Image (tube, rainbow, N blue to C red):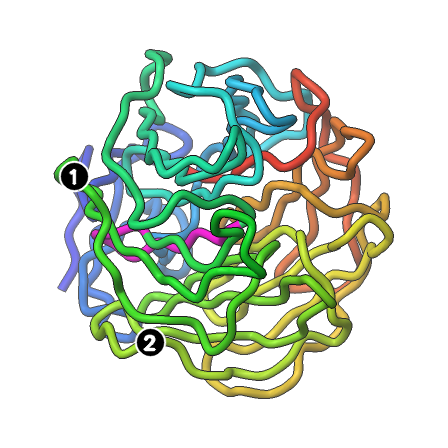
Amino acid sequence: MSRKISRSFINGRTGAGTGGQGLKVEWDSTNDGELHWKDVSESSLEYVAPFQGSNYGFTSGGNDNETTIDKFSFASSGNATDWSDLNRGRSQAAGSSSATDGFTQGGWSLYLNEIDKFSFTSTSTAIDWGDLTQNRYSLAGQSSTTDGYASGGDYSGLPGSVNIDKFSFSSSGNASDWGDLSQARVGTTGQSSTTDGFTSGGCCSSVNTIDKFSFTSSSGASDHGDLSVARGYGGGQSSSDYGYHSGGNTSSDTIDRFAFSSNTTATDWGNLTVSRGWMAGQSSTTHGFTSGGNSASLDEIDRFAFSSNAGATDWGNLSVARNAGAGSQY
């Protein structure tokens, strides 16, 4: 069943057709059994997963004490603009996204545990949303429809954390322990499907393992395959069916793609415009983005297609050159 409406509020998203036209609402039992929307003029349902954005990418923090949150368009290339500020400067934090807000977890400024929340529609400064179970940085972020997750990371100088933390998007409060990764690691990268979180790569001595954990069970992660090249400190992106791990360390330009549905080794999906690590990753419904990166602090924003392995193109620049920012999307 479907019918035309002028505006909708579905999965927490308010929207109108791109040309001012109405929206068609359809029941999508293929993905998660929820209502989703499309422009009336479109020929097929546009499925907007909780871990993807339709409008903008955001890059928060970086460079140890950077507080700037940048915003850039998914629809048109160009430079990012200063959107807001974190509650506290940090780098190597994890990023998660709800339908309305971005979250930045942990990070480096002497081992942080704070979770910041900022609005996708208001330029007000981020607020303190709670704490992780451990003070740590160089961790990965994942997003379900209702909760954010933070996995791995450097824990008080130890070789790495196995912890997977879970926190609520709807109510402030401290995160809870959601199980363990298959191995302790830092410099991890996060991806999300509609049902599971994924943590790929890491260090020290480079890790190629891709872990998978359930959003509905706290039983911990299992090995889901391997990257094509072992590396840490990459950027993570997610389409509806695949996870992507782009770059890593300071010398990799490889974009890896792996299937959410099968635990096989990732395949090479093209290259970034510049070899880099320590970048933020963002996901639209059709493309992956990387922003900033490297120990020398870059400002480049790259874009690559989920449907083609032709590699990335230059999409613009951040307002502040930086490495180790956290990514989110709206």
The x, y position of residue 239, in whole percent, is 50, 61
Image height of 13 relative to 200, above or below:
above
Position of residue 151 measured from the top left corner of the image (x, y, whole percent): 43, 58
Mark 1 sits on what residue?
Answer: 173
Q: Point out the image quarter for the C terminus.
A: top left
Disc 1 marks a residue whose amino acid type is: Gly
Magenta highlight range? 139-148
In what element is the residue under mark 1? Answer: loop
Q: Residues within 10 Å of mark 2 (few under 14, many from 20)?
A: some
Quadrant of the image for the N terminus?
bottom left
- For this rendering, which residue is in front, 11 or 228? 228
Q: Position of residue 55 (x, y in %)?
A: 45, 34
Amino acid bearing label 2: Gly
For marks 2 and 1, the one nearer the N-term is 1
Q: Can you identify the residue that label 2 sits on?
A: 220
Circle 1 crowding by C-alpha within 10 Å: few under 14, some 14–19, many from 20? some
Which residue occupies 56% across, 64% down?
A: 185
Residue shown at the point (82%, 31%) measured from the top left: 296
